[in-house]
Image (cartoon, grey):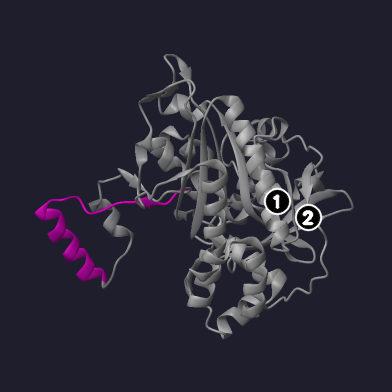
């Protein structure tokens, strides 16, 4: 790099590099004491290094160097525990047949991990219903492309998108596809020319379904809602997929607050406090900090990140999985009236509905739990009994 950038930009740069080109096989930041001086990459055979350098420099100049680095702000920290972490935890899970690798970023779970994940989810669900009066819904897997467009996802997170399509319903299309399939001896990108439907996507998070559910509705000014759901969410993670920490499809327990701005902000604060208390009971070590979403490939990326952090619109609960590493297991978000306006959800005659949401990554919660408490199932039961009623554990 002609001009080094602050080493404080390392995390933001690292989480973008694999998305810059599929031809980047591995990378390493070249660091000085306080600066990043370059990026060392290994490329797939036949890749033009000048083209990759140009793409890297463009992202660094437009999305990284422009970011104003704010000092980290931690709003909660758990008690410390004397924990011994295992570097080969995922290998041990595979060995004990608690998980099976099914493909890139895809994992099958055995009954022991299912029990752990279901119990953690039920604890959060019961806390949500009993303390906040939430109503639960079960949403379909697919989400309409138009709904996702209203959420602004295409402009902010194009690198995560996962589309659903199908063959155009015409007998000639089916015949042509079968001929191509036979001649190519398998499925390939050729089939995309036979696909015309772009009406649906795989949902990147669950709360978007809720805003879509209540679009074009009007509510009394005094009416506030709390909605909860669980379902599969999907994000393309490129080469970042790793163990249970980053999956292409994963489970999210979502809680959405809808109502006045004061109600949403107050609910978010109370929910954070209840969550921190729950994880203290479960003996999980971590912290909660001001965070930002992984915006990418937009001219205003740096401004979006700065604005989100300055207004503290997003907090992340990060749980330890190693002595020196944490993963984001939950987020607590405030959207003001953005989704109310985008989906035409009103309070009274003219005021837009304010919203906020909380999302828990169930696989990540389970992985952090095992990382900190080990693989002794009897120990799991003792610890889980501290955080939930016996009826939940018995289920």
Callout 2–callout 1 Cβ contact below 8 Å: yes
Q: Residue furthest bottom?
A: 95
From this view, report whether residue 133 is shown above or below residue 82.
Answer: above
From this view, report whether residue 273 is shown above or below residue 368.
Answer: above
Mark 2 / mark 1, whichever is N-terminal: 2
Picture quadrant where residue 387 is located: bottom right
**What residue sits right under mark 1 in the picture?**
276
**What residue sits right under mark 2 in the picture?**
78
Q: Is 254 placed left or right of 201 in the picture? A: right
Mark 1, Cα crowd under 10 Å, few <14 / some 14-19 / many 20+, is: many
Element type at mark 1: helix
Q: Residue at x 25, y 51 (%)?
A: 195
Element type at mark 2: loop
Q: Nearer the viewer, residue 342 or 77?
A: 77
Picture quadrant where residue 314 is located: top right
Q: Residue at x 49, y 25 (%)?
A: 353
Residue 394: image x %, image y %?
A: 51, 70
Q: Residue furthest front?
A: 390
Q: Residue furthest left?
A: 171
Mark 2, Cα crowd under 10 Å, few <14 / some 14-19 / many 20+, is: some
Residue 236: image x %, image y %?
A: 49, 55
Residue 193: image x %, image y %?
A: 26, 52
From this view, report whether residue 52 is shown above or below residue 101.
Answer: above
Q: Residue at x 52, y 59 (%)?
A: 122
Q: Is 177 placed left or right of 332 in the picture? A: left
From this view, report whether residue 369 is shown above or below residue 272.
Answer: below
């Amino acid at each position: 790099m002609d001009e080094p950038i602050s080493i404080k930009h390392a995390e933001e740069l690292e989480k973008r590099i694999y998305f810059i080109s599929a031809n980047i096989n591995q990378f390493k930041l070249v660091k000085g004491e306080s600066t990043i001086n370059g990026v060392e990459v290994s490329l797939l055979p036949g890749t033009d290094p000048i083209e990759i350098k140009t793409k890297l420099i463009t992202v660094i100049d437009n999305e990284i160097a422009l970011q104003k680095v704010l000092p980290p702000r931690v709003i909660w920290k758990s008690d410390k525990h004397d924990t011994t972490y295992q570097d080969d935890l995922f290998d041990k899970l595979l060995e004990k047949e608690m998980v099976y690798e099914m493909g890139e970023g895809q994992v099958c779970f055995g009954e022991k991990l299912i029990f752990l994940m279901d119990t953690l989810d039920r604890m959060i669900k019961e806390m949500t219903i009993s303390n906040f009066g939430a109503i639960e819904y079960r949403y379909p897997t697919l989400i309409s492309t138009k709904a996702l467009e209203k959420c602004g996802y295409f402009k902010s997170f194009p690198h995560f998108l996962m589309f659903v399509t199908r063959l155009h319903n015409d007998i000639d299309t089916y015949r042509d596809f079968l001929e191509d399939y036979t001649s190519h001896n398998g499925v390939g990108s050729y089939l995309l020319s036979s696909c015309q439907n772009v009406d649906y996507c795989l949902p990147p998070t669950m709360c978007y379904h809720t805003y879509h559910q209540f679009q074009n509705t009007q509510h009394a000014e005094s009416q506030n809602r709390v909605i909860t759901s669980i379902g599969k969410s999907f994000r393309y993670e490129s080469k970042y997929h790793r163990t249970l920490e980053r999956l292409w499809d994963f489970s999210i327990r979502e809680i959405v607050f809808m109502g006045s701005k004061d109600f949403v902000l107050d609910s978010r604060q109370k929910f954070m406090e209840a969550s921190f208390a729950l994880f203290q009971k479960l003996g999980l070590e971590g912290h909660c900090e001001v965070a930002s979403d992984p915006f990418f490939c937009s001219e205003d990326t740096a401004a979006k990140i700065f604005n989100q952090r300055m207004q503290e619109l997003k907090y992340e609960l990060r749980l330890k999985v190693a002595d020196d590493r944490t993963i984001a297991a939950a987020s607590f978000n405030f959207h003001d009236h953005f989704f109310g306006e985008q989906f035409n959800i009103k309070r009274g005659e003219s005021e837009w509905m304010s919203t906020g949401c909380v999302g828990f990554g169930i696989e990540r919660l389970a992985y952090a739990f095992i990382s900190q408490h080990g693989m002794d199932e009897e120990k799991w039961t003792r610890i889980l009994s501290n955080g939930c009623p016996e009826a939940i554990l018995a289920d």
